[in-house]
Image: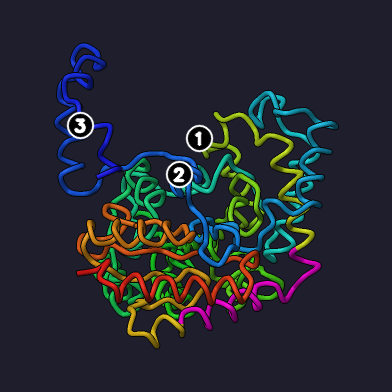
Amino acid sequence: MRFMSTMNDDTTFRAAAGAGEEWVHAELRALADKQLLRQARTAAELLGHAAQRPDGGPVLNFSSNDYLGLARHPDVVAAACEAARNWGAGAGASRLVSGTLELHQDLERRLAVHKNYAAALLFGSGFLANLGVVSAIVGPGDTVFADRLVHASLVDAVRLSGAELRRFRHNDSGHLENLLRKEGQTPGRRLVVTESVFSMDGDAAPLPELCAAARAAGALVLVDEAHATGVFGPGGAGLVAMHRLEGDVNLAVGTLSKALGAYGGFVACSGALRELLVNRARPFIYSTALPPPAVGAARAALEWVQAHPDAGRELLARATVFRERLTAAGLDTGVSSSQIVPVMIGDNGQALRVAQCLREQGVLAVAIRPPTVPVGTARIRFSLSLAHSEADLEYAAAVVVRAVREGAVA
């Protein structure tokens, strides 16, 4: 298979390995045998040199999280260029040394207002934001209660913190309540962690019920809004704002790299928590500040979102039509209720074959396999964007239905 091509010549691979690295070859071979070997390839490589839609239209990318199509928006690109001219390509230092620019502070103020919190703090990425926030809030002797399907960054954050990790069943507030009750006499802080929109299933968390359980137990709440910011809630403020839970959610984490089309992460919170994070969040303290072009781009994208408050609703409406076309044809889209629409396949190899079939028809939607998703739940994940027209969505739906029906899936 093409994705295994670099593994075919064992002798060449071993010759390229350094001293003491013989075990690496065995590890890679084991991944390949399970159809789990991955490579970082460009979109052009994924699509192939001869990729072309039979109807003559442009190749469609359904694997980008650029939900509002802002990454290439002229105003966003121009803002990035202007920030580079005015502030340079890089910030040059960490925020607590000399890397804090007025540009950073201005974006933080704007994000806080947008999310309806007193303050916000920028991080190098959403992953780093989760690592920094969780490890600054809890530590050994504390307990974190996390949804079983939360992002890897949140699981790694708990491990880094040294706190005990308790997993509750996906979106099951009753199970969370039971776990909190059992740990009620345990000393230390308690933190409840969930995503608002889950990145692989596209479903939404029952935030009011989860917050009620946390409130009754005196627990803090962190909600990762990476896939909700810009799409859900009033003016794209997210699901926390949609449910008016700012008073119950202590920490609303977000990213600048999805709907906002740039790069970086942030957390919206109280002023006191922000001050604590500035002094304890190691990824913030020991990382160079976000580069000015990324900050400038994110600021322009946020301005666009606020000027187009119905953009998220339009995207969700298109996603509903797309999802209904697939389910009407008998495809399993799981529990999706957002702009993320998975087509459940199950087997890793079959998912790869479906993805290849789609690529040959000019649709880029990659196979998602373990450990990103649970074993036996491999899928094709469609990330819809406002950059996709209704005609694009109709074409893609027809292609994926045909790929399944014509035997790409046994």
Q: Is residue 387 above or below residue 176?
A: above
Verify CB contact (< 8 Å) between mark 2 and mark 1. yes
- Residue lying farthest to the top in this orientation: 19
Q: Of callouts 2 and 1, which one flags the residue occurring earlier in the amino acid sequence?
A: 2
Residue type at mark 3? Asn
Say whether residue 312 is magenta: yes
* Closer to us: 252 or 297: 297
Res 383 visible: yes
* Closer to us: 393 or 283: 393
The percent coordinates of residue 99 (x first, y second) are: 70, 29
Indicate which disc residue 8 carries.
3
Quadrant in the picture for residue 10: top left
Q: Of callouts 1 and 3, which one flags the residue occurring earlier in the amino acid sequence?
A: 3
The quarter of the rendered structure image containing the C terminus is bottom left
The percent coordinates of residue 67 (x first, y second) are: 60, 62
Q: Of helix, strand and loop, which mostly describes the magenta segment?
A: helix
The quarter of the rendered structure image containing the N terminus is top left
Indicate which disc residue 282 carries.
1
Q: Secondary structure at mark 2?
A: helix
Which residue carries the number 2 mark?
131
